[in-house]
Image (spheres, rainbow, N blue to C red):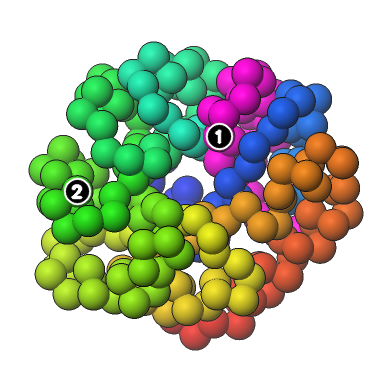
Amino acid sequence: MNVASFLQQRLVCVAVIDNADDAVPLAEALMTGGLNCIEVTFRTAGAAESIARIRQAIPTALVGAGTLLKADTVKAAVDAGAQFGVSPGLSEAVSRAARENNFPLFPGVVTPSEIMLALEFGWNHLKFFPAETFGGVNALKALAGPFGHTGAKFIPTGGITAATLPNYLAIPQVAAVGGSWMAERKLVAEKNWTKITTLTAEAMKIIAGIKF
């Protein structure tokens, strides 16, 4: 599957799932709200099982694995059926593992040097993280200057909300935005699927209203 197809809806839900039993209901809530792309972070013991359950139950969902910090985590994500991976930083070991497994990776970058290195590693879709902490929209606009012609595309993540979503998507070099506000950990733990669907639908409506 083409990397761009994972980002076609311009939004990736970044989710922390403490209980694998919540994985499929969460994905269903997102799908009902109009979003088919979820990044399940490897911050909990049930991450791999959560990915596997979603892939089995909802074949149309696009499921990524986040917080990939080590090569063996990349392998666990691939074995679970993840279709793409996301890392908060740039690691040669993680990059190599992704390449060896033919696994699309969005490595995390925040400085010009990291962007240059990521491009050298062969990655064009880069996670800009933590976005709001490191200058947000203004920082990305500045980085778009020297890297705009390279084919680099950014997926800003970290501190973004529905209110700031349009500002990021207005930047031509932003392929999609990663966000957790529509499925915060507390909402998932409370099994508040209705609220998650509502927040997701609101985000998709905002995206639909943006003129690209």
| Amino acid type, callout 2 | Glu
Quarter location, residue 179: bottom right
Residue range in magenta is 31-60
Label 2–label 1 contact, CB within 8 A: no
User: Residue 28 at x, y = what percent?
Assistant: 77, 43
Res 49 label:
none
For the N terminus, give its image quadrant.
top left
Point 42% across, 79% down: residue: 170
Visible residue check, residue 21 = yes
Residue at position x 27%, y 38% from top?
90
Whether residue 39 appears in magenta in the rendering, the answer is yes
Camera-side residue of 69 and 86: 69
Q: Position of residue 129 (x, y in %)?
A: 39, 53
The residue singled out by tag 2 in the image is 114
Amino acid of disc 1: Thr
Q: CA distance from mark 2 to mark 1?
A: 22 Å
Of labels 2 and 1, earlier in sequence is 1
The percent position of residue 203, horizontal first and vertical second, equals: 66, 68
Count the numbered circles shown: 2
**Residue 158 shown in magenta:** no
**Mark 1 highlights which residue?**
41
User: Where's residue 195, x and y in %?
Assistant: 85, 57
Residue in the image at 36% along x and 55% along y: 128
Q: Local crowd at mark 2 within 10 Å, few (<14), some, or many (≥20)? A: some
Q: Please indicate whether residue 124 sits to the left or right of residue 164 in the image.
A: left
